[in-house]
Amino acid sequence: MSQTHAPRAQAADARRPEPEIPVAFEGLHGWFAPGSSRRGVLLCGTYGFEQLCAYRAWRGLARSIAAAGCATLRLDYPGQGDSRDASPGEDAIAASVRAIRQGIAFLRAEGGADEIVLVGLRLGATLAALAAREGGVERLALLAPFATGKAYLREMTMQARLLDVLPDRTPIAQPPGSLLVGSFHLGPDALAALARLDPAAEPAAESAAAPARVLLLGARTDALAGHYRSLGGAVEAGPFPDLTQLVSDPLFATAPEATFAAVRDFACAGALPRSMPARAPRAPCRIAGAGWTEETARFGPGLVGTLCGPPDAHPAGPAVLFVNSGRNVRSGQGRQTTRLARRLAADGVASLRFDARGIGDSADRPDGGLPVYAADAIDDVRAALDHLASRQAGPVVVLGTCSGGYLAFRALCAEARLAAAVLVNPYCFALKPGTDVEAMIRDAFRGTVSYAERARQGRFWRRILGGEIRLGTVVRALWRDGRAMAARGAARLARALPGRGSVVGEIARLRRRGARIRLVYSAGDMGMPALRTHLGAHTGRAAARLARRLGYPVTVLEGVDHSFSLPADQDRLFAILTQVLRDAADTTERARIPARRSARGPADARQRAEAQGAVPAGAVSARI
């Protein structure tokens, strides 16, 4: 979609009411849809990496239940997504169960629900079962629940060995006393609470009644089924055959349509109509914490974003625009984007994190295609900049990781309102028209060793002869590897003779405009070949030339994983981003001050700008 036609598409989208609205209560962030029946359904998602994978499908389930007439609420647990962190001294599990009970109260008060249904997924199912023991729940749907917290910990410990690795596939050293799973942290208190978690053994409240109807889907649910039958509940049990496709890959996760249809029917069957439909709350979705305030809103062509800033944000200060990495919702891998935004706000910097179309809570893409590396995602960035500009007039720095780094670079090239970009482990800088993006992504994450290199290994041929690997697959992969080598050679030639369409030519135009690029890589990351292909060496004598070309030297960090999962690595990224923001603010200030005064130096210029109110004092502090 071109920029010319964007307003027309936005107007058309605005005429279609959204079934859900963002809500905030008790420090929790959620999505609510009022219903026409007397029944309310609370969706209790799973935790961390698994919820990151299931997010879009979980949203679809909530919408299908709302379309059937039930008021629905899905929420982020404390310390997850866009909710506030758990209260000091409260472990994450107790806080999550408390949040479910608060969600039930919200459905009764705002949704007018007389009957409550809890639908839980994985660990969320275990937590829902625990919350239901306090009573007030008529129906309970548990999807692939963990019988105990120990069972969850065993599975997550195995997943961590596969998910949390360095670029050379070496496992990341786990933080002492904690568990890192797909960049999400479970601290000592959470681990201790999970080790004790056993819904079937927890004492029920004296006045509590067991849910009258229970749906159990998944393997190894016999013990829970027996437990609920012993309490007098009517239990339906069945398989969950498509669970793996839902919770194992955030980029290519697929919704289990048949299973979710059965869940919707169970949740909504027999719901009685209300005499008058409930109305959606009209208050803005706002949450505040120590040094930050946030508001989640819709804007542009069906986009959803969360604007974060200090309570007294200065409109002329610098700001950050976060773009999605892959199909990760705007809170980010390991919830890093939410934490980084709130940390920036405490230092006086506003930011906007948003979901492009086809990701998280934003509208579907018109073509229904993969949103990653999509050319028209630039239109989403423009709409996000418009939304940010309604609150902030200072320089904007865009930050993206991996595929988000690609989008951030393309946005910097296309949008003059962006002052700089921080690109973290970008896989590429340009795509040839007609590129099969899905095949490219699957090949990239196949591993760092190409089939040509594997062909030199005897075990590789034994696997072919044994039928473990199909020869046709190898031939196709070798053809792709060959084309990739040819493309790298062509790019090297283009770099030597930079033309208008080359990456080097684009960067030269950016530098003439005054924009700068900060490239940050984990040592050995799979995106580094693209750096060498398009921009040349980043070490030795070439390093200084490359730094002049970009505006910053290339930063390569040893011992850091692709997602910057560990807190110490996130601190390093925060320091880099803060420096870029400081430089952008200083450049803007110098441009505002008459040339005859600017000769006194950047430090004096900043003091004069602060005195004139052009930028807030300490807008980007040195607390890094």
Image (cartoon, rainbow, N blue to C red):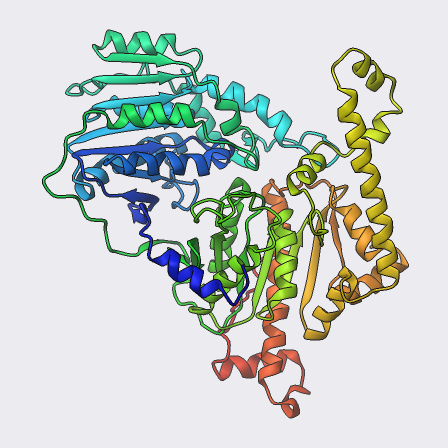
* Nearer to us in this view, 514 or 288: 514
Res 7 seen here:
yes
Compared across the picture, whether 21 is left or right of 582 comes to left
Q: How far across and how far down the image is residue 506, in percent?
A: 73, 65
Q: Which residue lies furthest to the bottom in this view?
A: 596
Task: Name the residue nearer the viewer: 221 or 498.
Answer: 498
Quadrant placement of the C terminus: bottom right
Identified at 38% across, 58% down, the residue is 12
Q: Outermost residue toward the left?
A: 275
Residue occupying the point 50% across, 51% down: 356
Say whether residue 524 is left or right of residue 349: right
Picture coordinates of residue 1, whole percent (x, y): 54, 59
Residue 222, above or below 274: above
Residue 188 placement (x, y as % from top left) = 49, 30
Look at the picture and state if 85 lies above or below 122. Answer: below
Question: Of 466 and 592, which appears nearest the observer?
Answer: 466
